Amino acid sequence: MNSNKIDTVLLAGTHRNPKRLIQNTNKAFLTIDGKPLIAYVLRTLLETEQIGKIIAVGPREELEETLKPFMTEKGKIIIIQQRSRMLENVWAGFLTTFKDGNPLPVNRAIDTLLLAGQLPIKKQSHLYIIKSLYATVAKAMDDNQQETLSKNTIIQLIEKRFNEFRNRHERMEWFMGRVTIETLLAERHVLDNSDQGISFQKAAFRDYFLEWEHRFQKQIFVVPADVPLIVPQAIMHFIDACSNYDSDFMFAVARESVLKAFYNGSGNLPGIARPYMLLREAKIRAANLVLVKPNRIGNKELIQESFGVRKMTEWRNVMQAIWKLVKQKNRYQTLRLAILLQLASV
């Protein structure tokens, strides 16, 4: 299988939430012309060139029975049992894309080396950042097909990675301020400093951190099972558009001007009223296509809570959403954003 292809998590789990059932049926198993919705989506995924493995997450027994006609290519489609919430289903699907089931490679010997040294590692997140620094160095060596890099090059790599954490993931200025190239070299555990440049002490170390970087940067495509009209061209267009941005979480949107024709009623019928997010450029709705790098996402609980109250058409739901946001980390920034979005709607 082409390593450039993107693994997909196909979400088909709602049986545990009665409010989301239609005629007591999971939307993924509703039928059109005798075929369940998930069958249409799966067929589209199989016909999309950029798609690699497909992880279907939902009620396992029903999925195995429904998808039996598609299980001809070994390892292409994997079915796993749903978890309790959407984000847990996505994460479980992400883990399944790795043979060892781990989001990042495990090497206890390297962990012991790093923890036994003088690095200011006080908690797991600090170790995570340190490994990320070594990983970006290993990736640069692999890209340039070199076993050594200059000190100035590594300083630039470290600063760039630190900025990624500052801007995207966590704010740990105290910790980052105490870690420099001199700190890493003083450890004498992982890197060597010679006249030729800086290199890893062992090829096994470089290979481990290169694998760490690959998993750290791995992205997956996420799509629900209840979009039967989706076509390969739409998926390819979305993935190609996302390739123009260095982002961790990207989702598709559709404008009201495009969707309106599909919701208009015929004759005297009023049609379907759909809520939209009001932006300066246009009124938009999420289009249920997501490209995400799970290992680079922080505040996962905030994403889950926001998703759970995303259809805020009543003020009761708006206040519920604000209350949930207030209880999260970075509460003031998220609360400010929620209030601004509601003011835009008003």
Image: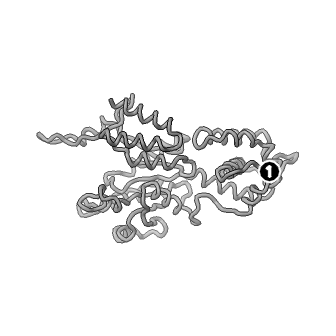
Q: Position of residue 141 (x, y in %)?
A: 72, 49
- Residue located 42% across and 70% down the image: 72
Q: Residue tagged by mark 1?
A: 118
Horizontal side, residue 275 vs residue 156: left or right: left
Residue 82 placement: quadrant: bottom left
Find residue 75 and report its horizontal and vertical position in percent: 49, 67
Residue sitting at x 64%, y 50%: 125
Q: Amino acid at mark 1?
A: Gln
Residue at x 31%, y 55% (from the top left corner): 20
Q: Is residue 228 left or right of residue 175?
A: left
Residue 194 horizontal side relative to residue 319, left or right: right
Q: Crowding at label 1, few (<14), some or many (≥20) Cα neighbours within 10 Å?
A: few
Circle 1: element type: loop
Residue 135 appears at what percent x and percent y? 69, 51
| Quadrant of the image containing the C terminus | top left
Residue 29 visible in image: yes
Image coloring type? one colour
Is any atom of residue 164 visible in this view? no
Q: State the residue in front, 14 or 164.
A: 14
Number of marks in the rendered image: 1
In front here: 121 or 295?
A: 121
The quarter holding residue 38 reads bottom left
Q: Position of residue 200 (x, y in %)?
A: 78, 53
